[in-house]
């Protein structure tokens, strides 16, 4: 796992996490359990990892969900007994100097979407880490960008 310092202008200097960091272990456990809860179709556990004001950004341009809207959309998927399966292949975590905010990005192995990337923000509230924002994306290699851009533009022009 690669940990990088990033300047934090509002909260002060970042804390560089090490492999032994208690905060990093706790954040990793939350994110891993959040992904596992989806794979196990445990809707309650999955959504308990999201803060009340959380936002989930999906891969489609229309997918910007509040926690409540995301739960309504995802409920039928969880009800069928399997949701989605994301497994972090790499994750970077950056902790703010106050120890209550963390930023992360992760490369994901997913059976349905292929290689994906997730990034987001967690905050520590009442002694537990909660996801405030998650952004799921499909990284497009630069060599494919023109072709993908053309397909996106063609789709946008359809009535």
Image: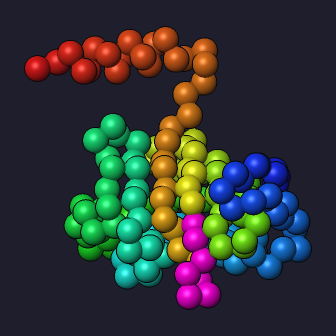
Q: Point out residue 27 in the picture as x, y percentages from the top left corner.
A: 67, 72
55 is higher (above) or lower (below) than 140: below
Q: Where the C terminus falls, by quadrant?
A: top left
**Residue 121 position within the rendered picture, expressed as x and y whole percent measured from the top left:** 57, 60
Q: Quadrant of residue 62?
A: top left
Q: Quadrant of the N terminus?
A: bottom right
Residue at horizontal 28 percent and vertical 14 percent from the top: 154
- 152 lies left or right of 144: left
Q: Please tell me in which quadrant of the rendered image residue 101 appears.
A: bottom right
Taking 49 as reference, is 64 above or below it?
Answer: above
Nearest the eye: 156 or 21: 21
- Queried whether the magenta region covers residue 85, the answer comes back as no
Residue 100 placement (x, y as % from top left): 65, 73
Q: Is residue 81 left or right of residue 30?
A: left
Between 68 and 124, the one nearer to me in the picture: 124
Q: Is residue 77 visible?
A: no
The magenta stretch spans which residues? 122-128
């Amino acid at each position: 796992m690669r940990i990088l310092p990033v300047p934090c202008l509002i909260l002060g200097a970042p804390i560089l996490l090490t492999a032994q960091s208690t905060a990093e272990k706790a954040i990793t456990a939350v994110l891993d359990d959040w992904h596992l809860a989806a794979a196990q179709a445990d809707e309650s556990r999955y959504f308990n990892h999201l803060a009340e004001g959380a936002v989930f950004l999906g891969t489609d341009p229309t997918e910007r969900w509040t926690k409540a809207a995301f739960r309504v959309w995802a409920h039928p998927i969880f009800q069928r007994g399997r949701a989605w399966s994301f497994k972090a292949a790499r994750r970077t975590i950056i902790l703010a100097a106050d120890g209550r905010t963390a930023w992360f990005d992760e490369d994901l192995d997913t059976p349905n979407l292929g290689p994906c990337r997730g990034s987001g923000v967690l905050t520590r509230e009442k002694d537990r880490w909660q996801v405030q924002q998650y952004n799921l994306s499909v990284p497009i290699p630069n060599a494919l960008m023109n072709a993908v851009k053309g397909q996106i533009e063609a789709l946008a022009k359809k009535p």
